[in-house]
Image (cartoon, helix red, strand yellow):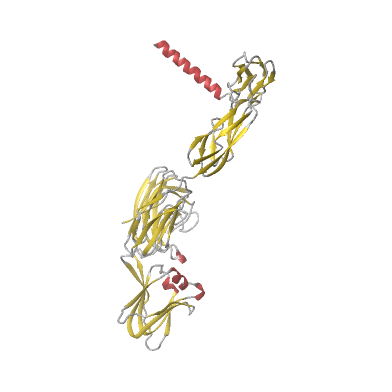
Amino acid sequence: MKKIVFLWIVAAIMTAACTEKFESSGINGVYLDQSALYLVNGNKANLVATVDPVNASEVIWRSSNTEVATVSQTGEVTATGAGQAAITVTTKIGRRVASCDVFVNPIRVTGVTITPTTFGMLVHETASLTATVNPGNAGDKFVTWSTSDDKVVEIHRVTGEMKAVKDGVAIITVVTRDGLFTAECTVTVTKIPVTSITLIPNTVTLELNQKETLLATVLPEDASFPELTWKSNDEKVATVNQSGVVTSVNPGEATITVTADGVSAECKVTVLPPSSYIETVIWDKEIDFVLNEWSNATTIPNANIAVMNPGDIIKFYFSFLGEDPEFEIWRGSWGEMLVDAVAPKAGAESYEMTLTEEMIDKMRHPEWGSGAFLVQGQQMKISKITILAPVLPFYPNQLDPFNATLADNFQWGSGYSGQMQSGKLLFDPAYDGVIAVGTVFEFDMEFTASRDFEDGELYVAIIDSREEANWWTVKGATRTKEDLIIAGEKVSRKIEVTITEATSSTTCNLHFETPGEGVAGTAGSGVKGPVTLNFTKFIVNKK
């Protein structure tokens, strides 16, 4: 038993040694100038062997049947009798091999045919064609196959097995080695048609600012189609991306349609109106339209309409209504009428209308200077004008992993060297409404630092991106003391930020700050960077 084990180990070592020698020989291969010879008994022919790299190894010639053909060590082949033999050439280094078939006194090929000459396939199908070499008793029946378009049909060069890749037409050609006779077959590939699409769910009810992912099932499973196409019939109510994610925009109804290969399915989307609003006063002075008909036109300043968003409600309060009260809204300084002859009902205390994107755009047009819009009327008094902005639901927002590269020696704040994350839009809940004072957001994050960092603060601030003149208008912020962060160690933090001032269209800025050693805002003060924080998790939740 020990002897057998010993012999097995020795054999394994020898095999490993041979394999290593073969793989490290540097010989890529050896090639012959002909794959077949057709000789009359007694005739001779020469084969030429080429080693890659050239002259990197000597070669050895052999014949599989010397009664049919012999070969010298220079590659000269001599026919010795009727039949078939294989002449092989082998490199001494690396043992690379090539061969040539020799036919002595063969019956020569006169032609070839393919059955059938036309053929149909479905995408993804496999099939084989039959090649008939004539005459039936020919000595060399070896053939090779090719395709005119391998993007439509792929074919194995030797076996002739085909695979349909996509719809279209390809010409399959077979060639005999003896005589180079050819035959062709026209193959037409047809795609597998889509028979049905099912959407789950097929009805959806959403609140504002909510998302829903639709799942489309296409049958049959192996149907061929370029892609699914998604479309909303009313993007002012709900939009859909090409991954099937539906986003609610405004109250109303919309139909989401998915299409593949001319077959469609639909999902009915209902977007509910907001359940609550935050009211902001934009005009609190009485406008008197009682004494004069269609007079006392009043300009509502541009600064007061900065809070408006499409879908908000503008509300007019009345302190008096006469017998035939009416009012109009004009763009700018009598530029264009936006709302014509609104007639409040008798005894009404207020009148509401929904703002559209077009109305707001015209009100904000810089051509009219500070005049945002004009109100004029008759037989009424307007006591104030407000904007009702919907309080929208919040859904958790998870960012993809990202790196926050903290700049070298960037100054921030009083006595602090602040490192601001490049690209401030870390968090965007796509608000069109207002976030109320007291709302709490939780930032759940995990990160590692590129180097040790001590005696610093992690600073998360929510800002109002609508205030373009001064984008760094903090609406809520929290700092956490960081005594020591060790390079490469995972740091987990949950930081809560409370909104201190009502805001809309919020974004989030992330800073890492270290105590400054010089004058605040002066180059050279503070701990030097750079430092990179690799965030593997960053999730925002509403508490």
Relative placement, left or right, of 40 versus 220 is right
The answer to which image quadrant residue 464 occupies is bottom left
Tell me the quadrant of the picture where the C terminus can be found.
Answer: bottom left
Residue farthest bottom in this picture? 291
Q: Position of residue 71 (x, y in %)?
A: 65, 16
Give how far across and how far down residue 428 sits, in percent: 41, 58
Q: How many marks?
A: 0
Q: x, y (%) of residue 424?
A: 45, 57
Instruction: Tell me what residue is drawn at x 39 percent, y 11 percent.
Output: 1
Q: Give the vertical position of 523 relative to 134 (above or below).
A: below
Of 330 and 136, which appears nearest the observer? 136
Q: Picture quarter containing residue 349? A: bottom left
The residue nearer to you, when weighing 240 against 403, is 240
Q: Is residue 452 above or below residue 316?
A: above
Q: Residue furthest front?
A: 135
211 or 225, which lies in front? 225
In the foreground, 135 or 82 = 135
Residue 469, compared with residue 5, is above or below; it is below
| Residue at (49, 42) in percent of width and height | 123
> In this rendering, would 234 be left or right of 89?
left
The percent coordinates of residue 542 (x first, y second) are 33, 57
Examine the image and state in which quarter residue 313 appears.
bottom left
Residue at image location 54% in from the left, 30% down from the top: 159
Residue 509 seen in the figure:
no
The answer to whether residue 123 of the structure is visible from this angle is yes
